Image (cartoon, rainbow, N blue to C red):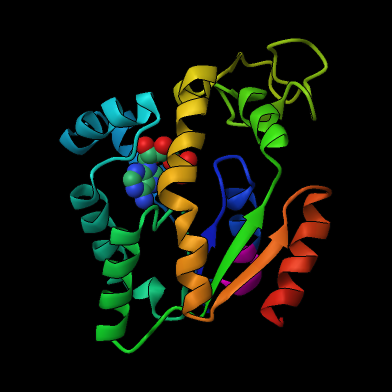
Amino acid sequence: MRIVLLGAPGAGKGTQAKKLVEKYGIPQISTGDILRKAVADGNPLGKEAKAYMDKGELVPDSVVIGLVKERLTRDDCKKGFILDGFPRNTAQAEVLDKVLNETNIPLQVALCVDVDMEILMKRLTGRRTCRQCGQMYNIYFSPPQKESVCDKCGGELYQRDDDKEETIRRRLEVYEAQTAPLIEYYKNKGILKTVEGTGDIDEIFANICSILGA
Ligand code: AMP
């Protein structure tokens, strides 16, 4: 199965992608995760990407497209893949189509996870992560028992740099201006499906599975 997950930051693409990985045994390719790892490693790619990410802007296409092209050539993508956070604009979508068509493995589904703007703001501004074990919380929807302390390991909870309010506003603006037009792009190709992304995570996943016919 070859899927693109569409949806605004905070829509839950990453969460649902992980569940799809478990069910189908195909890899999740998250450009956000690849870039965050490069930033944490402090390599040249990470240094270049960080400035854009901290401002909520898109990292240049030339950088991101190269990463995805390389990732798609690996063996684990032969059975399929879940693209999460890529493509982010029409230029990226066109390159992706070209690359996949050249190898005769076109995309099968572009699945849009749809969530109301007000809920997105709370999901993003409320997100906290444990520095020690990586456990995620949300101060509005799933708060820790004690403020800023991880229930699991007692580690300190922190807010991702790009989850600060000003950056979030910019990320949502960038989404509306550059990424949302991809909904029309994939609709015109006849492969767009939409799932309501609010509510219980497992219920959303069950809806996704029925949409994918699995
Ligand atoms: P995400 O975790 O998908 O929300 O991505 C976090 C940040 O990484 C974004 O705000 C962008 O700065 C950058 N990023 C992730 N994916 C892409 C992409 N496909 N194109 C450009 N920038 C990206």
Q: Quadrant of residue 50?
A: top left
Spot occupied by residue 206 in the image (x, y as percentages of width and height) = 79, 66
Q: Is residue 116 left or right of residue 112?
A: right
Number of numbered labels in the structure image: 0
Q: Which residues are magenta?
A: 20-25
Between 79 and 109, the one nearer to me in the picture? 109
Q: Residue 21 lies in magenta, yes or no?
A: yes
Q: Quadrant of residue 86?
A: bottom left
Q: Is residue 145 left or right of residue 82?
A: right
Spot occupied by residue 130 in the image (x, y as percentages of width and height) = 60, 23
Q: Would you place residue 91 above or below residue 98 in this image?
A: above
Q: Would you place residue 176 above or below residue 92 in this image?
A: above
Spot occupied by residue 82 in the image (x, y as percentages of width and height) = 50, 65
Q: Residue 169 lies in magenta, yes or no?
A: no
Given the current orientation, which residue lies at the most extreme top position?
A: 147
Given the current orientation, which residue lies at the most extreme bottom position?
A: 104
Between 111 and 118, the one nearer to me in the picture? 118
Q: Quadrant of residue 42?
A: top left
**Image quadrant for the C terminus?**
bottom right
Question: Which residue is found at the position 20% from the left and 32% from the top?
Answer: 48
Q: Is residue 154 left or right of residue 86?
A: right
Q: Main secondary structure of the magenta part?
A: helix
Question: Which residue is found at the position 60% from the left and 73% from the top?
Answer: 24
